[in-house]
Amino acid sequence: IAATQVYRTAPLRFKTAPRAQNEVVFGVVNDIHGRNDVMEKLLGNLDFKKTDLVFFNGDMANDLRSEEQMFTDFMDTGVKVFASEIPMYYARGNHETRGQYASPFPDYFVTTTGQLYYLIRRGPVCFVVLDCGEDKPDSDIEYSGIVNMDFYRTEQAEWLREALKRPEYVTAPYKVVICHMPPFGGWHGEREIAGKFVPLLNEAGAQIMLSGHLHRHIKAPATDKNHKFPVLVNSNNNMLRAKADERRLLIEVIDQQGKVTDSIELKPTR
């Protein structure tokens, strides 16, 4: 506080999550790929006096080559706009697994599990944050034989099976999954998500999955053949703004000009 006063900047403040919270407001951006100007416009759609948390839902950079590049590609802008005082949570995308700085990347985004997959309960919402891994097979020439994403997703599914039994999930009126890659699209990683994560989420009553990756907007309805919950794929040029209270969870898709281009509404499960 003394330092910020010396430099004529208001003291930075944050507040911990209240024990009892009847509503929560959150935002989601994804697939920024280092385009700080786009991210700043999108984040400008949030009223941070009323926003509780923001998710970076993967592919915020093209790859991770150094600490400096990670900050210049997206974190500096995030801190400038909100993250000095508003909590930010990360769902890793496939591009964050690439580059020589991919290994230390998790050290910057510490979670309760020690992994890049975890649960968060804020007010009436339980967020299930998953790490999608890479989109290509482990044998792809790009990985030089040094990745084992298939096993990693199997290991993650074992964690997920038990996590979905925890009271913060079971008792939540809204159950929201955050996963960069959706469970469709035809590539190897997407099929892995459909085969390893989706059956568990179906059984546990997940209400919606928020994804990115495809660089286009898709609102896929629930289907008995795959995901029994809707999947909202956000494009690389829009953001999601959401508010959950005792009546509904409203998720709006907003473009860079602040226009609401689509929305989806969910009712509480109890």
Image: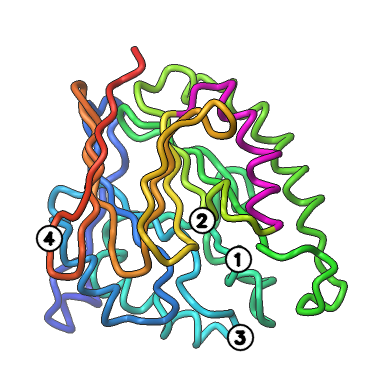
SS at badge 4 = loop
Q: Where is residue 67 in the image (x, y as percent from the top left)?
A: 54, 83
Along the line of sight, the residue nearer the viewer: 224 or 55: 224
Q: Position of residue 9 (x, y in %)?
A: 14, 76
Dot 2 amino acid type: His
Dot 4 amino acid type: Lys
**3 or 2: mark nearer the eye:** 2
Along the line of sight, the residue nearer the viewer: 173 or 72: 173
**2 or 4: mark nearer the eye:** 4
**3 or 4: mark nearer the eye:** 4
First of labels 2, 1 by sequence position: 1
Dot 1 amino acid type: Asn
First of labels 1, 4 by sequence position: 1
Tags 2 and 1 touching, CB below 8 Å: yes
User: Range of the magenta residues?
Assistant: 188-206
Residue picked out by circle 2: 180
First of labels 3, 4 by sequence position: 3
Q: Position of residue 163 (x, y in %)?
A: 61, 29
First of labels 3, 2 by sequence position: 3
Specify whether 17 is left or right of 90: left
Residue picked out by circle 3: 65
**1 or 4: mark nearer the eye:** 4
Give neighbour class at mark 2: few <14, some 14-19, many 20+ (Cα, 10 Å).
many
Q: In this view, does 72 lie above or below 214?
A: below
Specify whether 50 is left or right of 197: left
Along the line of sight, the residue nearer the viewer: 270 or 118: 270
- Any mark on residue 94, and which? 1
